[in-house]
């Protein structure tokens, strides 16, 4: 059997033998005054679904899209009400236990991460799982030509393409537009709010669904390439 199935909408006899299982990993955190708290989770889930569709061709193995991990390590956004973070230790343990469970029936597990703050936890958990001989890797939702880091031009454009009904562009504001590499020391020590009071890193005002469609296609293309290289992540 080849093809892809959505695990959340399926029953156990639908599950193929030893499939590739895609697990989106997101967050529940502020994304400025105009994007919803589930932005990272929505994008990671959409990218994973796109990858599942692409890899479900007859030349590839069966693919299962698992429900997303919707809470991540978002401590840097804790200065904003509504942010719900489980932290690095809990996220690490969640991934470890999930991989152990999935491995009883999955052939390979691929985590698709939509939030930069999750990287350390995911990397460490994947390394531990590989030491236990689990076939697991992870990839980020990234692509070339993406210019800003949080709730700015790129992320807003992708959301305008994927879910325009949840984007409140009339509330969008320019945030801190300095390059992320310059902001990282402050972001890791004091968090986002002292660096950008509105929670935006970048400029979302010129965002468009057309740009989002191009960027989303690039995200899926990049993820598919990485997914076909099991040694990565």
Image (cartoon, rainbow, N blue to C red):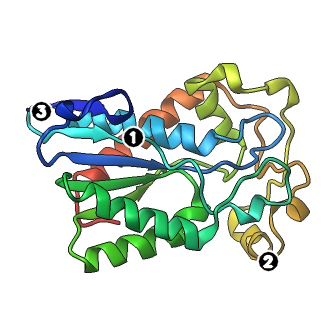
Give the x, y percent position of residue 27.
61, 51
**Which of pointers 3 and 1 lies earlier in the amino acid sequence?**
3
Specify few, some or many for label 3: CA neighbours under 10 Å numbering under 14, 14-19, or 20 or more: some
The residue lying at 57 percent from left, 30 percent from top is 212
Q: Helix, strand, or loop for circle 2?
A: helix
Q: Residue at x 83, y 33 (%)?
A: 172
Frontmost of labels 3 and 2 is 3
Q: Name the foreground residue: 210 vs 193.
A: 193
Please say if 7 is above or below 119. Answer: above
User: Which residue lies at the image location 59% right of the left edge and 58% below the top edge?
Assistant: 72
Q: Earlier in the sequence, mark 2 or mark 1?
A: 1
Which disc, if any, is residue 189? 2
Label 1 element class: helix
Q: Is residue 125 above or below residue 52?
A: below
Q: Earlier in the sequence, mark 3 or mark 2?
A: 3
| Residue 48: mark | 1
Separation of residues labelled 3 and 1 (CA atoms):
17 Å
Q: For the residues marked 3 and 2, what is the alpha-carbon distance in whole angstroms?
A: 47 Å
Q: How far apart are labels 2 and 1 at the CA level?
A: 32 Å
On screen, residue 78 versus residue 224, left or right, reads right
Q: Quadrant of the N terminus?
A: top left
Q: Residue furthest front?
A: 12
Q: Residues within 10 Å of mark 2 (few under 14, many from 20)?
A: few
Q: Is residue 126 visible?
A: yes
- x then y, percent, for residue 233: 35, 66
Question: Which label sits on residue 2?
Answer: 3
Give the vertical position of 105 relative to 132 (above or below): above
């Amino acid at each position: 059997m080849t093809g892809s199935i959505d695990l959340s909408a399926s029953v156990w006899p639908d599950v193929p033998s030893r499939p590739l299982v895609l697990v989106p990993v997101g967050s529940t955190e502020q994304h400025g005054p105009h994007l919803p708290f589930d932005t990272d989770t929505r994008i990671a889930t959409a990218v994973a679904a796109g990858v599942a569709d692409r890899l479900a061709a007859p030349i590839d193995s069966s693919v299962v899209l698992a429900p997303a991990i919707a809470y991540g390590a978002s401590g840097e956004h804790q200065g904003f009400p509504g942010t719900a973070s489980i932290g690095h230790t809990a996220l690490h343990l969640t991934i470890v236990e999930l991989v152990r469970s999935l491995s009883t029936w999955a052939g390979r597990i691929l985590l698709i991460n939509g939030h930069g703050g999750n990287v350390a936890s995911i990397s460490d958990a994947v390394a531990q799982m590989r030491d236990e001989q689990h076939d697991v890797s992870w990839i980020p939702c990234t692509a070339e030509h993406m210019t800003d880091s949080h709730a700015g031009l790129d992320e807003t454009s992708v959301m305008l393409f994927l879910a325009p009904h949840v984007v409140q562009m009339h509330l969008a504001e320019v945030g801190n537009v300095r390059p992320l590499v310059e902001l990282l020391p402050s972001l890791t020590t004091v968090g986002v709010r002292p660096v950008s009071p509105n929670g935006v890193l970048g400029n979302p005002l010129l965002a468009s669904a057309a740009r989002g469609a191009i960027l989303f296609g690039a995200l899926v293309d990049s993820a598919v390439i990485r997914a076909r290289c099991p040694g990565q992540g």
